Image (cartoon, rainbow, N blue to C red):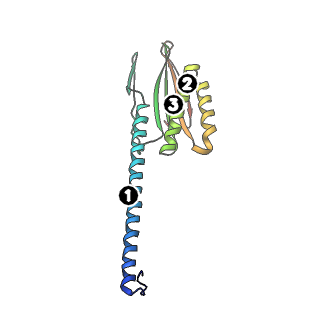
Amino acid sequence: KKDGSDFEDTDLQLLITIAAQAALAIENYRLQVEAIEQMRAKKELEIAGELQQRLLPENSLLESEGVNFSGFCIPCTEVGGDYFDYLKLGEDKLGIVIGDVAGHGMSAGFVRGMAKSCVNTAARLEPSVPKVMDMLNGAIYQMAERSGMMTCIFAIMDKRTNVFTFANAGHLY
């Protein structure tokens, strides 16, 4: 004490009370920071899910000279690995892809986005089922150790010849 007297039990009790209040304030602050971080992460997942939904075809119903296609995707979490798309490949050909990345969450969503980009690029460069599947397989294989696997069906419908060519990479149908 400033006056040189000894500390008493009441002084110790006061110090314990102040320390308990400080500990409670610190814990409340930590919990508040954690809650804010969880809300931010949840918002980011919601935004990622919305962006992922935008990667699906704008019109899930596609009519192409007497053939109708329809699809929809409802992920079980905000972000997932389910994927389908229709690709116009010139005047006479239509590409169709259905895929499923193993797992859920951001990593599956990332692989799904990469797969969409790969399929779109490959199909536009060379609209051939074997070539597209080979390029997709190469891209997925490079990521396999980190991200798991993906099943996929890719098809090209030639409206001029009425030929439907497809390849199935482990996808149940």
Question: Seen in the image, is 127 located left or right of residue 10?
Answer: right
Mark nearest the camera among 2 and 1 is 1
Q: Earlier in the sequence, mark 2 or mark 3?
A: 3
User: What SS does tag 1 mark?
Assistant: helix
> Disc 1 residue type?
Gln
Q: Which residue is mark 1?
A: 32
Evaluate whether residue 126 shows in this view: no
Residue 90 rendering spot, x and y as whole percentages: 50, 14
10 Å crowding of disc 3: few (<14), some (14-19), many (20+): many
Residue at screen point 55% across, 39% down: 150
Q: Which residue is mark 2?
A: 121
Q: Which mark is residue 116?
A: 3
Residue 76 rendering spot, x and y as whole percentages: 41, 45
Residue at screen point 38% across, 68% down: 24
Pointer 2 with pointer 1, Cβ within 8 A: no
Residue at screen point 39% across, 17% down: 66
* Residues at marks 2 and 1, CA–CA distance in whole angstroms: 45 Å
Q: Nearer the viewer, residue 172 or 133?
A: 133
Q: Nearer the viewer, residue 14 or 64?
A: 14
Question: Seen in the image, is 155 located left or right of residue 35?
Answer: right
Q: Nearer the viewer, residue 46 or 159?
A: 46
User: What SS does tag 2 mark?
Assistant: helix
> Disc 2 residue type?
Thr
